[in-house]
Each structure stands twice: as structure tokens, then as C-alpha cells.
Image: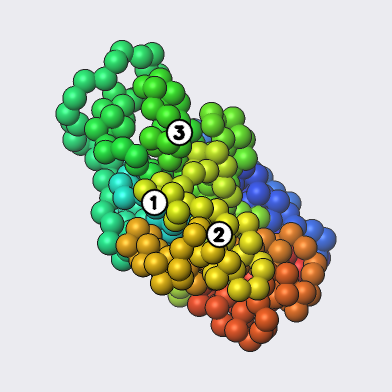
Amino acid sequence: MKEKRILLLLDNIGNVVIQNRVGIIRYARPHTSWVFLRLSPGLPNLMRLVRNWKPHGGIGRVGREDLIRLVRRLGIPFVNIFGGRQFPEVPQVGTDDQAIGRMAADHLARLGFRHFGYFGLQELGRGGFASERGKGFAAELQKRGHSVEMFNWNRNYPGRVPHTARTLWGEVRWQRWLVWLPKPVAIFACDDLRAQWLADLCYKLGLRIPEEVALIGADGDELECQTAWPPLSTVRIPSATEGYEAARMLERLLAGQAPPTESILLSPDRVLTAASTELSAVSDPRLGRALQYIREHSHEKCPVEAMAQHAGLSRRVLENLFRQQLKTTPFKELRLLRIERACQLLRETNDSLDTIVSRIGYSCRSRFSTDFRRQMGITPVRYRKRQHPAP
């Protein structure tokens, strides 16, 4: 095979980028003869360095219009790993950012919160990943009858906050926003790094996590999540699969195939729960007991009836409480928990589909497949293949 030089425009930090590279290499080895040059998109003299190397193609994470223009000037087949708004000038693979926001909203709403906040980025030009995640978050909450306070970078929030050591631009405004929000409040930060920033501010301000402020981030960056205090819940994205699918697309472009007309958007994996959201904010303790029971016994037969009995309620009263406080039903909650467990088993085990169906409490494989596709937008078989792509 003739050697091909492949440019990787990827930053040097972050678990997402590391997993993107894992996916790219997993695809490229051993059936291609690609050699790689990895450069940061913000590197000075980037164009000169790239042109001296003369790559045949490239893959990168490019979310700014100036970098998109730079990529187009290279005149080579290039695949952008980006799940936000589409840049139609460049073929694109990524995780659906609005779906990430919806998953975060679903997780927090099911805990029983009534007040919600979103912390994103100050983005210029066409909306990037943070804007898209915020849209998905707000839209899902609106469907459930909730509103959300989006942090506004141009607003001066009222009130005074105690003086603390400040290291980041805009930190005073974040502090005022955190204090101003009604409590208890559940906040989704656009990524794990920003969630960690908010966790640090809560510590400085004496706001208890998760009792007063529940926090969830996104991307599944283990370093950011586990070094925060308390550890952070996060929406995990299939970063390695992003890289794998981007490499697959690039090989097709190098072979002369026409670029796809639509972005390839993957579904986020699931919420990895940690201490930052490990509570139930429902006001009725009976409902809290019911939720705890169904989370521990979702795999059993007839758990809804047992849940009502455990909470000391009739099934009808329990259903009314679910509708009033959680905007859902016990059966829908049960179904979501089972699908979440199925996703975990599909990713982490080699169990057959029939075995998984039995382990999560379904008695009918066809019913499970229908529910899974309705919830995840993909069949269980296809979901597993995306988690473990084969060359």
C-alpha cells in the first residue's frame, strides 16, 4: 500500500481528544499505510508547517469559522469531528450535541428538581457545541413544563458575593448567578471542565452540592470529573467511535468518493452518575422511597406494584405523584432505567441480546427492541456495533 500522510488537527489535552485519537488509530491499523502528524489548531505558523509536510488528508476538531477557512485553504480531503451546528464546507462526524443536552435534562428532571440552570460558553459567529447543548437542554425541559435560566455573559446579575480568590475571567458574574438562582437548583454545564469550575465556586461560596446545587457536565472526562469535589456526574459521549467513524469517512474521501451531504451524528452513551447529582429533590418522602426502590429493582418482574407497596401507596396515588412532581409515570421511569442498563450491558459485555433482555427485566425481545429504538434512535445491534467498531 502506498503511504499517505494524514494531518491530525487536535489539541494536546483532554480525554475526548485522546479517545478520538484511539478511534482513529484503531481504524487505521493495520489495514492502511497512514502516517500521522498531530498539530494543535491554534499553533503559530500552522499553515507553513502543514504545507511543508504536504498531507494527503486530515482529521480534526474544528469549531471556529476561521479554522474552517484554514482547513479549506489546505485543499485536501478533511473530516471535522464536531457535533454542534454543521459547517457544510467540511464533512463532519460527531456526537449529537442537542441529544447531549436532552440527556442531561432528562437525568436532572427525573430527580424531581423544579429550578434549572445552564452554563455555556460565549461563542462568536455560528453557534458551537455549547449553544447546541443548551438548546437541547432547554427544549427537553420545556417539554416537561420547566423553564431554565441560561447564564448570560452580557448580564450583570444582582446581589453581592463575598470576596474570594478569582483566577478566571467572568468569575464574579458566575458567582452572582449561582447565588441569584433559586435553590435547590440543578445545573447543566456545557462540558466537564466548566462543571468543575462551578463546583469550585460552590465550594468558595459555601453552597452545598448536591443539596443546594446539583451539577452535571458532559463529555465523560474522567480526570475532570474525579478531581472535582464532590465528583461530577457527566453525559458520556462515544469519543473513540467519533474518531473511528471520522477515519472511515476520510478513507472513502481519499479513494475519490463524494463527501456525504449530511453530518454523521452519534448518540451520547449515557449519564455516568456521581455524588454531584446523587439525591432526589422530590418534596414527598414517599415518592423518594419509590424512586430509590425502582432504581434498585428495575430488573425484577412487576416492580411498579412492588414500588407502590414499598412506598406505602396505592398504585393510583403513586401514579398521580409521578405526574404531579416528575411529569412522567412509574412505567416510563421503569422503561428508561431498563434501557440505560441495556446500554451499559451492550457496551461492557459480550452477552447475547436474549441474555440482556432477560437480565434487565423484559420478557419479550421484540418489545425491548421497540422501546430501545424509540429511546435511543437506533437498534440494539447497531448500538453495540458503534461501541465496538470492527475494521
Quick one: label 3, few (<14), some, or many (20+) residues within 10 Å?
A: many
Q: What kind of element bears circle 3?
A: loop
Mark closer to the observer (2, 1): 2
Query: Hey, which quadrant is residue 142 in on the image?
Result: bottom left
Q: CA distance from mark 2 to mark 1?
A: 14 Å
- Along the line of sight, the residue nearer the viewer: 199 or 133: 199
Name the residue at 58% across, 66% down: 306
Name the residue at 79% across, 69% down: 351
Q: What kind of element bears circle 1?
A: loop
Q: Residue under label 3, please give it.
A: 209
Is the residue 240 above or below the residue 317 in the image? above
Residue 310's label in the rendered image is: 2
Query: Hey, which quadrant is residue 101 in on the image?
Result: bottom left
Task: Report x, y in % for residue 162.
Answer: 29, 15
> For the C terminus, which image quadrant?
bottom right
Is the residue 85 above or below the residue 230 in the image? below
Identify the mark nearer the N-term, 2 or 1: 1
Q: Mark 2 and 1 residues: CB-CB less than 8 Å, in contact?
A: no
